[in-house]
Image: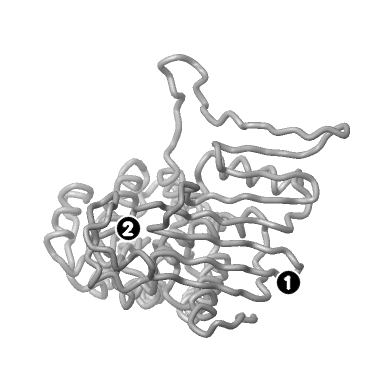
Amino acid sequence: MERSRKIKVGIIGCGGIANGKHMPSLAKLDNVEMTAFCDIIEERAKNAAEKFGTKDAKVYKDYKELLNDKSIDVVHVCTPNKSHSFITIDALNSGKHVMCEKPMAKTSAEARAMVEAAKKSKKKLTIGYQNRFRADSQYLHNICERGDLGEIYYAKAHAIRRRAVPTWGVFLNEDEQGGGSLIDIGTHALDLTLWMMNNYKPKSVMGSTFHKLSNKENAANAWGPWDPKKFTVEDSAFGFITMENGAVIVLESSWALNSLDVGEAQTSLCGTGGGADMRDSLRINGEKFSKLYETKVELNPGGVDFYDGKTEKPEELEARLWIESIINDTEPLVKPEQAMVVTQILEAIYESSKTGKAVYF
């Protein structure tokens, strides 16, 4: 792809995640133009075009009309989970590179079809796991890659909110989303954990999902009380994952849980050479000269009063590296094959909770 010309991007789905993450991040890139916007609520697409689009940006209600535009190089899919797979596959087949918001899909079959479509079309596909691009995640991944922690055989994927149920959009709708806290925020914690371990071969999964606090009227909640009648997804979910090499991962997720031990998009890792967690910034622990040690990593680039240093937000780094992977024809940091395994494990937790039995791969 010519380095001099600008990459033309189309946005499909102009709701919360597009406005909060994708469009502001793309707008900061000099080599990108957002030329098309699509939403089933046309007003949202018009507003997005006015705020982020080129002067001649087009607005659509039907995503297939947007895909017919041959000038568009890249599509960002920011719709509810239910439509991730078929919109992504149609976009790949129409010759576009695709960034699809997480989770990859509602089911592993849909995720696999997306991977196959990317291979067949020879177009790039990535999934929006922006927490990989945080400073602590990048630092910890470098440590893991270098082998400082040795063999990581036990890990925890943390996604616990005490009371923060998203009450807008379709978050509480099982048909549209496929689930609640597990598929929404558990997916980030699991992605981080698998990426740090560089282990994508699950053997078995046991899991339980709960609807324990979702029926509360006038509940305390970060975004105001939820409507119990509309709360059709789990409020919390927990999984026990065994990998082929014997390693074990405990996954914990909740939107509402009576716990003070909160934190999301975090991982704790235990290896033969040391351990790490994100519970208080980034902590590394181990043993040297027959003594135990603990190191807290200073991630603030400034170090000077009144100056925080020049930093890119994780979502900005995600967008920039994604566009650069297209220009330079390199692999994106989040590979679709990796995201597919996340979806497989989440699906297995839901399945195990329904049947009361372990799911084997």
Residue 276, by quadrant, is top right
Q: Residue furthest right?
A: 289
The numbered mark at residue 235 is none
What residue is shown with label 1? Answer: 244
Q: Residue at x 47, y 60 (%)?
A: 253
Drawn side of residue 141 relative to residue 51, left or right: right
Inspect this view and state whether residue 252 appears. Answer: yes
Residue 46 vertical position relative to residue 237 in the rendered view, above or below: above
Query: In which image quadrant can residue 185 be found?
Result: bottom left
Q: Nearer the viewer, residue 233 or 183?
A: 233
Residue 165 image label: 2
Looking at this view, is 292 or 309 the one in front? 292
**Which amino acid type is shown beneath numbered disc 2?**
Val
- Crowd class of label 2 (few under 14; some 14 to 19; many from 20; radius 10 Å): many
Residue drawn at x 54%, y 77% is 348
274 displayed left or right of 74 = right
Q: Is residue 219 left or right of residue 312?
A: left
Among the 4 quarters of the image, the one containing residue 17? bottom left
Q: CA distance from mark 2 to mark 1?
A: 34 Å
